[in-house]
């Protein structure tokens, strides 16, 4: 099974449900070893964000994420992701996610790979 390569790539959200934490100014930097991947991120109202995940198929993955909120509280969630490469050869990650703490609400996010020259 050939996996999409996330290693060394950066992503920003282009769409997020209102109850999500990230904004378009958030940057996610990924690393990957075979089917395992992780990312670090931060944003306007949170710090110390991390993702750990694994591919469950050639274009699907499951992951958990956490960060520190505005009062240094821990915020934790889980997601299922679908990945695809668009016509510009950029990776798109679409996630269905749910907070495991906070209000335990769920939502959807769409992340787009940042162009290599930006």
Image: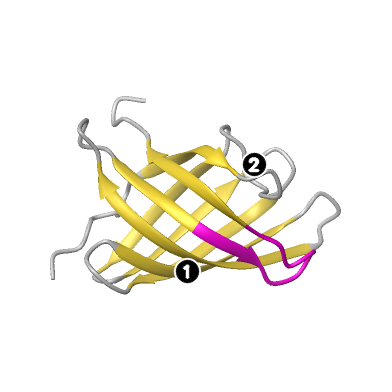
Q: Judge from the rendering whether residue 84 lies leftward or rightward of residue 47; answer left or right.
A: left
* Looking at the image, residue 116 lies above or below residue 66: above
- In the image, 45 versus 89, the foreground residue is 89
- Residue 26: x %, y % from top left: 57, 39
Of all residues shown, which one is farthest toward the left?
1
Q: Residues within 10 Å of mark 1 (few under 14, many from 20)?
A: some
* Looking at the image, residue 68 lies above or below residue 115: below
Q: How is the image coloured?
A: secondary structure
The boundaries of the magenta stretch are 96-106
Q: Compare marks 1 and 2 and give the one earlier in the sequence.
A: 2
| C-beta proximity under 8 Å, tags 1 and 2 | no
Q: Give the CA distance from mark 1 to mark 2.
A: 19 Å
- Residue 25: x %, y % from top left: 58, 32
Q: Name the disc covering residue 43, or none.
A: 2
Q: Quadrant of the N terminus?
A: bottom left
Q: Name the disc covering residue 63, or none.
A: 1
Under tag 1, what secondary structure?
strand
Point 71% across, 62% down: residue: 105
Of all residues shown, which one is farthest toward the right?
71
- Locate residue 38: give its quadrant: bottom left
Does the magenta-highlighted stretch encompass residue 103?
A: yes
- Locate residue 106: give its quadrant: bottom right
Q: Judge from the rendering whether residue 14 lies leftward or rightward of residue 68; answer left or right.
A: left
Of all residues shown, which one is farthest toward the top?
117
């Amino acid at each position: 099974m050939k996996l999409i390569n996330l290693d060394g790539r950066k992503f920003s959200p282009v769409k997020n449900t209102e109850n999500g934490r990230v904004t378009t100014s958030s940057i996610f930097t990924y690393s990957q070893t075979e089917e395992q991947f992780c990312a670090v991120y931060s944003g306007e109202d949170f710090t110390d964000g991390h993702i750990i995940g694994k591919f469950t198929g050639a274009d699907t993955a499951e992951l958990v994420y956490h960060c520190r909120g505005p009062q240094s509280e821990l915020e934790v969630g889980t997601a299922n992701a679908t990945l695809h490469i668009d016509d510009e050869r950029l990776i798109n990650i679409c996630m269905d996610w749910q907070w495991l703490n906070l209000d335990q609400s769920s939502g959807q996010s769409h992340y787009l790979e940042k162009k290599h020259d930006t």
